[in-house]
Amino acid sequence: MSENAPFPIRSWSEDDRPREKLMLKGRSSLSDAELIAILIGSGGRNETAVDLSKRILAASGNNLNQLSKLSLQQLMQFKGIGEAKAVSIIAALELARRKKAAEIPETQKVLSSRSIFELMQPVIGDLPHEEFWVIYLNNSNKVITKLQLSKGGITGTLVDVRLVYKHALEFGATAVILCHNHPSGTLVASDADKTITRKLVSAGENLDIKVLDHLIVTESHYLSFADQGIL
């Protein structure tokens, strides 16, 4: 073996192998790179799975949130990552995102724009494309459910006003909150955002269903139409 060639994981001390380390010491003892190494299973001829994982993390600023935004094709650009390994990484990070979203109970009461942000950020805050969601509330401002009404590209999405209120009537909602994300991170309401909000407010008035707010959500911040006085 070359002096510079890394030892394969199977030749490591049992305490240093990611799978064995997890079983012996628990999952919290593993680094992010070691957890990813378990997902991908193996490295390349001159690189262990842990070293490959460290390289992928380094390219993402050692930030799992940034790593979760990489596409299948982008992950496969790393030498040693084929389609199957890339799919495993994407699936694991998507499960983590869904777990975070599921931690917030749907029966919570909406008390402020901040509580809306905390409900929706795990759902749409990190997405690379725009989605429009509606939160349906009862007369105590408790969440009945939340639904994705449309999904678009990087710069916009379309919303069917009739569909928004069809669901509201089906659920017996007395109020709705509109919510969409800006993948660009820009917290500025566009003319299109303001136009669809006015249409939904007007339609809701005719049905006695109030639009309480419209939030634009980004990765870490939000803009509330109600707070800004532009509802």
Image (spheres, helix red, strand yellow):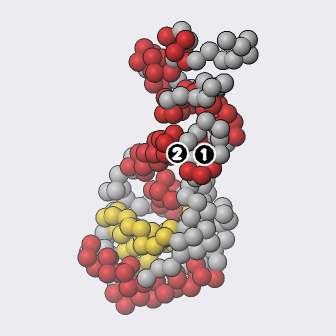
Residue drawn at (31%, 76%) of the image: 167
Q: Visible in this render: residue 226? A: no
Q: State whether residue 18 is above or below residue 52.
A: above
Residue 128, given in percent of the width and then of the height, sits at: 58, 60
Which residue is the extreme one toward the top? 13
Q: State whether residue 111 is above or below residue 214.
A: above
Viewer-nearest residue: 112 or 84: 84
Residue drawn at (49%, 10%) of the image: 14
| Residue 87 left/right relative to 47 | left
The quarter of the picture where the C terminus appears is bottom right
Viewer-nearest residue: 46 or 139: 46
Using the image, tell me which numbered label, if any, was put on residue 83: 2
Residue 73, given in percent of the width and then of the height, sits at: 60, 52
Residue drawn at (61%, 29%) of the image: 44
The secondary element bearing badge 2 is classed as helix
Cα separation, mark 1 vs mark 2, equals: 6 Å
Q: Quadrant of residue 195?
A: bottom right
Q: Cβ–Cβ below 8 Å for labels 1 and 2? A: yes
The quarter of the picture where the N terminus appears is top right
Which residue position is annotated with label 1?
A: 76
Count the marks.
2
Residue drawn at (44%, 60%) of the image: 111
The secondary element bearing badge 1 is classed as loop
Tag 1: Cα neighbours inside 10 Å, few (<14), some, or many (≥20)?
some
The amino acid on which the numbered mark 1 sits, given as a three-letter code, is: Met
Viewer-nearest residue: 38 or 105: 38
Residue 133, given in percent of the width and then of the height, sits at: 45, 69
Tag 2: Cα neighbours inside 10 Å, few (<14), some, or many (≥20)?
few
